[in-house]
Image (cartoon, helix red, strand yellow):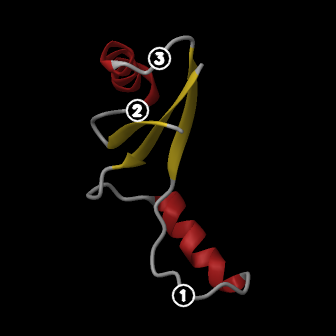
Amino acid sequence: MTRVIVDVMLKPEILDPQGQAIARALPRLGFSGVSAVRQGKRFELELDGPADEAALADVRKMAETLLANTVIEDYVVRVEG
């Protein structure tokens, strides 16, 4: 089995209200030194076989079709381990 990670983040030019809310809450909770926060999503996929180019192409297709809204989000696919 192979684990593949898909990290999805809003594109830099897209406003991230959840990230801004987190950034505003951190000082109230006693945390300092954070100037900005961007919130994203992480998907962990367990593949039955190896993470060869065909499998990774399928994962990228999954990301573009279901996991990410490519109009406003970017994604990165990586093999863990």
Residue 46: percent from the left, percent from the top? Answer: 59, 22
Q: Amino acid at mark 1?
A: Gly
Q: Is residue 25 left or right of residue 47?
A: right
Q: Where residue 14 appears, x then y in whole percent?
A: 31, 54
Q: Is residue 21 above or below residue 29?
A: above
- Mark 1 secondary-structure assignment: loop
Query: Looking at the rendering, which quadrant does residue 76 occupy?
Result: top left
Query: On residue 33, which mark appears?
Result: 1
The residue at the point 51 percent across, 56 percent down is: 39
Q: Amino acid at mark 3?
A: Pro
Q: Earlier in the sequence, mark 3 or mark 1?
A: 1
Which mark is on residue 50? 3
Q: How many other residues sit within 10 Å of disc 2, few (<14), some (14-19) or many (≥20)?
A: many
As rendered, which of 53 and 20 lies closer to the eye?
53
Residue 63, percent across and down?
A: 39, 26
- Left or right? Give the position of 41 relative to 25: left
For this rendering, which residue is in front, 76 or 20?
A: 76
Is 17 located above or below residue 62 in the figure?
Answer: below
Residue 13, image quadrant: bottom left
Where 7 falls versus 33 (above or below)? Answer: above
